[in-house]
Image (tube, grey):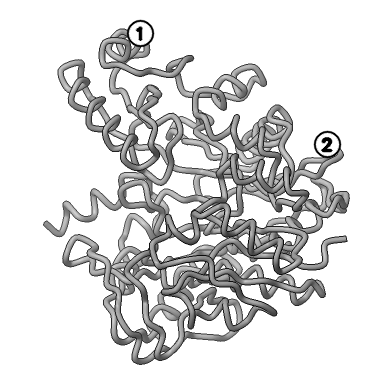
């Protein structure tokens, strides 16, 4: 049995994992950089270990220091959270070599699914719909131009080992291809240290629909419904909701079955997310699989009543899933807004600094996941997310009203936030009607320009 978990992360996800562990009677170890010595997760954990200076490369991305902290503290498992090392196959492999339980999938599975070309080929073999794209990695403009001509324009160039919207460019015509490829490859090299690229047909005006799955070590796989993550800026999600207005019961079943099929084909274990692009015609395509817990997991927890972090820990501990697909019921509607320390009026410029006052809303169907407090210093070194505000109601219309009300109660003084911008989205007629796609933000910004 897992007795002590080290959380290899920071901020609200570290706090989220600590709370789940407390409820399960599991001791916790927090790790922190010098910039995070007063962070909430270091105060809530049973123990806390400093792993290096402020820059993430010297602390939260320092595998050796994290493994050392695990061994010194006597923790027998690591929860990677999201971001940082959460999808790093080398880190998972290091845990395996050191006999530390990694709360996530096997390192080989992370490696295979982290490579977009390999993941795509796995899905093709399993019969999961995929977007027409390159079958092998692409390294040069010349190779890419030939393949792009075969696939058909528009083309999106992606970093094969990337994520988070980095190393991605669209070429609408052959004339644009060279510049798009070279820019994306340069970005990929800088962000991931790898210039291997991948090409696929660019699906215009799609919705971003993802299915949450749970898979144990005995071949049992279930999906927990979908999340609509179409409200995003520069491929970064801003608002997520479950269920999606775009899915009929028949389409939901079809996509859910494809998600389960995808997980089984990859020999997946633990919590994961199958991401699809959905066209207005109802055609959908596998995009990628995230081998970790997602930022937006609370909306799924609201509509299913299932604690995903606890399920992750149970699966890693070798327990069988107690859930079958027939047990999963979607109840009501949930929406999540990501509150960031940034200034939308200044091109979303990050806004680090000292928080002088905080108030979060409460009440039935309102949840706040955060690690900030009055007097907390928001460091400039990490992601700018301050909190996740999540609401749950009987239907989408009521959930939108509840989120507007909840956002109106939030007070965060001392730093700029995107709260007013989120409120603007929630009042947009297209959002209210459910007529959204991944290009919604761009269209909204053009309206106000």
Residue at 35 percent of width and 8 percent of height: 150
Task: Decide if residue 398 is in sight here.
Answer: no
Image height of 169 relative to 143, above or below? below
Name the residue located 77 percent from the left edge and 60 percent from the top edge: 76
**In the rendering, at what x and y percent does residue 23 appear?**
77, 76
- Provide residue 408's location: percent of width, then percent of height: 37, 82
111 sits to left or right of 36: right
Q: Quadrant of residue 202?
A: top left
Tell me: 397 left or right of 30.
Answer: left
Q: Nearer the viewer, residue 150 or 68?
A: 68
Q: Look at the image and tell me whether residue 125 can be seen.
A: yes
Q: Check the picture and name the quadrant holding the N terminus.
A: bottom right
Gap in Å between the C-alphas at discs 2 and 1?
Answer: 38 Å
- Residue 219: image tag: 2
Instruction: Measuring from the top left, give residue 227's x and y in whole percent.
Output: 55, 51
Residue 150 is tagged as 1
Q: Relative to residue 344, is residue 247 depicted above or below?
A: above
Q: Residue 442 vs residue 330: left or right?
A: left
What percent of the width, then of the height, locates residue 109? 66, 34
């Amino acid at each position: 049995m897992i007795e002590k978990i080290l959380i290899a992360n920071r901020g609200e996800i570290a706090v989220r994992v600590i709370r789940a562990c407390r409820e399960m009677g599991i001791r916790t170890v927090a790790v922190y950089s010098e910039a995070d010595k007063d962070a909430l997760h270091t105060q809530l954990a049973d123990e806390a270990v400093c792993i290096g200076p402020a820059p993430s490369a010297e602390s939260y991305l320092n595998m050796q220091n994290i493994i050392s902290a695990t061994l010194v503290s006597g923790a027998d498992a690591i929860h990677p959270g999201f971001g940082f090392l959460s999808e790093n196959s080398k880190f998972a492999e290091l845990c395996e070599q050191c006999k530390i339980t990694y709360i996530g999938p096997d390192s080989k599975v992370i490696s295979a699914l982290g490579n977009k070309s390999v993941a795509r080929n796995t899905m093709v073999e399993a019969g999961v719909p995929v977007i027409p794209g390159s079958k092998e990695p692409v390294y040069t403009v010349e190779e890419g131009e030939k393949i792009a001509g075969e696939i058909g324009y528009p083309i999106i160039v992606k970093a094969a080992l990337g994520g988070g919207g980095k190393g991605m460019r669209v070429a609408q015509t052959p004339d644009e291809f060279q510049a798009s490829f070279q820019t994306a490859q340069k970005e990929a090299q800088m962000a991931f240290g790898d210039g291997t690229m991948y090409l696929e047909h660019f699906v215009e005006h799609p919705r971003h629909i993802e299915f949450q799955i749970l898979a144990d070590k005995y071949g049992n796989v279930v999906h927990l419904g979908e999340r609509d993550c179409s409200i995003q800026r520069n491929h970064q999600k801003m608002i997520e909701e479950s269920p999606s207005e775009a899915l009929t019961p028949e389409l939901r079943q079809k996509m859910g079955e494809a998600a389960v099929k995808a997980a089984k084909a990859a020999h997946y274990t633990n919590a994961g997310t199958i991401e699809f692009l959905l066209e207005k015609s109802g055609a959908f395509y596998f995009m990628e699989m995230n081998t970790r817990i997602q930022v937006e997991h609370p909306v799924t927890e609201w509509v299913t009543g299932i604690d995903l972090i606890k399920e992750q820990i149970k699966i890693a501990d070798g327990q069988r899933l107690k859930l079958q697909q027939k047990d999963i019921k979607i109840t009501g509607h949930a929406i999540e807004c990501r509150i960031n320390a940034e200034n939308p009026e200044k091109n979303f410029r990050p806004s680090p600094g000292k928080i002088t006052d905080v108030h979060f809303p409460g009440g039935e169907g309102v949840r706040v996941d955060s690690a900030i407090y009055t007097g907390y210093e928001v460091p400039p070194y990490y992601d700018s997310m301050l909190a996740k505000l999540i609401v749950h109601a009987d239907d989408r219309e009521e959930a939108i009203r509840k989120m507007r009300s909840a956002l109106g109660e939030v007070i965060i003084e001392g730093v700029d936030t995107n709260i007013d911008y989120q409120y603007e989205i929630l009042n947009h007629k297209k959002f209210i009607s459910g007529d959204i796609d991944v290009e919604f933000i761009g269209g909204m910004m053009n309206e106000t320009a």
